[in-house]
Image: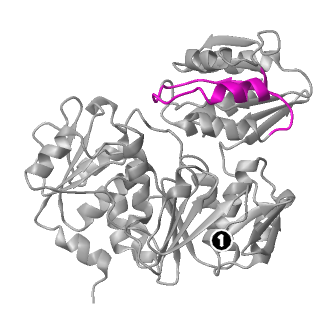
């Protein structure tokens, strides 16, 4: 008897398949479709002369390419695979849907055919660390874990290697969740704050997309929510709903006097968590609630003492002449930078600014005044961050010098030059990277390169 995976791909044979976006996540999908003999058209806005070798190899293997300006004009398809970064309401997608095309995505199909238990994490901040923590805890307990989604490797091509006893742990963005019609057996929402409003039409659409992570759960499924977040505290799940909190006792996991409890039983001392920051205590609480019944408390404590964190998330890059340089490139929103600033007891030298996602910066001003000794800005959001700081009643130009550097590299070099022994230099932009970099990872790598060359 063929598996759900094979049945799905065999059902596509004889249909016209269009894959929108030929980025990293969709390339393995195209190879799969070609393997099953499908008629595939790959669509991407990148001009042909700028396509990399891997995409051209897909063309040689049989994928028809529509690239460059007007790449969506006149596309015909029975089944359309949407790239996560493209809004489902895109006029070209709407037109295809109206002509009868079924619109789906690599992640939606993975949820449909995955043979093992699914644990999924979303949120505005902390989702990558929480997803990784859940994976690390399960692996340390001896489970076979497949880590993917918005982090790591595309999972759909790996389904044939998965067993029912395995665990798939996935990070999901709002873009991936927007038109999902399936939810995992265990869902976690770390928190929600304004984000990606350059793509979502408003905050309501953003929050509604996030709700899809638990919207289709059944009575036997589990939902873990942040009781301290005004938005997630109001969510209502269909099954077992557990809350975590640093401020009060909940029905599941909470911190009290430096100790993390689950259902009233001590699990972990917060001081034993190796990675810094109160936000990471919250990430641990979310993970502890998610793996209840699957991972022993002893294993959780072992992970806490040994897990050094995820790259680009308050990552110590170098100590030079007594100055510590940290890479927090993942911080593409004010709330994420606030969490980074609160991770340090002393005031830091902050490098911030980048691409404008049209989200408010008001909340960042007071935090910078409280936690920053010198501020170096670059990118489109630099003026917005400066404005947010200067309008704070507690702002003092003498106590907090602000330097507009124009671009990222200039800001890094200026901050490094201003640092003295004992200082902490934190690159935590509170903005997306797209003004100068492909993504936050490229930005983080460039920062590390600059710091190592000092």
Nearer the observer, 136 or 211: 211
Against 69, residue 201 (above or below) is: below
Residue 33 placed where, x, y %?
A: 25, 62
Q: Residue at x 10, y 50 (%)?
A: 98
Q: Is 40 situated left or right of 74 in this image?
A: right
Residue furthest out toward the left: 99
Q: Is residue 152 visible?
A: no
Residue furthest out toward the bottom: 1
Kindly indicate the quadrant of the structure image that contains residue 252: bottom right
Q: Is 308 situated left or right of 86 in this image?
A: right
Residue 205 placed where, x, y %?
A: 36, 45
- Residue marked by disc 1: 251
* 360 in the magenta segment: yes
Q: Is 374 situated left or right of 95 in this image?
A: right
Residues in magenta, as a range? 344-373
Quadrant in the picture for the C terminus: top right
């Amino acid at each position: 008897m063929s598996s759900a995976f094979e049945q799905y791909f065999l059902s596509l044979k004889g249909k016209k398949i269009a894959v929108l976006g030929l980025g990293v996540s969709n390339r393995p999908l195209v190879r799969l479709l070609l393997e099953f003999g499908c008629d595939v058209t790959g669509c991407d806005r990148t001009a042909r002369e700028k396509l990399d070798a891997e995409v051209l190899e897909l063309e040689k293997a049989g994928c028809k390419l529509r690239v460059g300006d007007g790449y969506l004009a006149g596309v015909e398809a029975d089944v359309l695979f949407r790239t996560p970064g493209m809004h489902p309401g895109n006029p070209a997608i709407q037109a295809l849907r109206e002509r009868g095309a079924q619109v789906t995505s690599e992640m939606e199909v993975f949820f449909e055919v995955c043979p093992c238990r699914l644990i999924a994490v979303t949120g505005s901040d902390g989702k990558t660390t929480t997803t990784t923590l859940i994976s690390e805890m399960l692996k340390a307990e001896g489970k076979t874990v497949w880590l993917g989604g918005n982090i790591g490797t595309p999972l759909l091509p790996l389904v044939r290697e998965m067993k029912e006893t395995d665990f798939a742990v996935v990070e999901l963005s709002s873009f991936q969740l927007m038109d999902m019609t399936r939810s995992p057996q265990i869902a976690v929402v770390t928190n929600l704050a304004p984000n990606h409003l350059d793509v979502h039409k408003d905050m309501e659409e953003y929050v509604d997309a996030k709700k899809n992570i638990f919207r289709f759960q059944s009575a036997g499924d589990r939902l873990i929510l942040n009781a301290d977040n005004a938005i997630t505290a109001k969510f209502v799940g269909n099954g077992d709903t557990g809350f975590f909190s640093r401020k009060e006792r909940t029905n599941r996991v909470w911190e009290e006097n430096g100790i993390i409890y689950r259902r009233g039983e001590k699990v972990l001392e917060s001081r034993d968590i190796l990675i810094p920051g109160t936000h990471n205590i919250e990430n641990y609480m979310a993970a502890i609630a998610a793996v209840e019944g699957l991972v022993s408390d002893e294993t959780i404590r072992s992970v806490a003492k040994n897990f050094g964190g995820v790259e680009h998330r308050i990552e110590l890059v170098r100590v030079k002449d007594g100055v510590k340089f940290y890479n927090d490139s993942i911080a593409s929103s004010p709330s994420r930078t606030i969490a980074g600033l609160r991770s340090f007891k002393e005031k830091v030298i902050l490098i911030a600014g980048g691409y404008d996602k049209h989200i408010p910066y008001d909340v960042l001003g007071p935090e910078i005044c409280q936690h920053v000794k010198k501020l170096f800005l670059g990118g489109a959001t630099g003026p917005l961050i400066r404005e947010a700081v200067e309008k704070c009643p507690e702002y003092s130009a003498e106590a907090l010098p602000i330097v507009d550097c124009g671009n990222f590299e200039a800001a890094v070099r200026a901050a490094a030059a201003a640092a003295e022994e004992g200082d902490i230099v934190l690159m935590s932009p509170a903005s997306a990277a797209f003004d100068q970099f492909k993504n936050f990872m490229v930005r983080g790598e460039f920062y590390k390169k600059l710091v190592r060359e000092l």
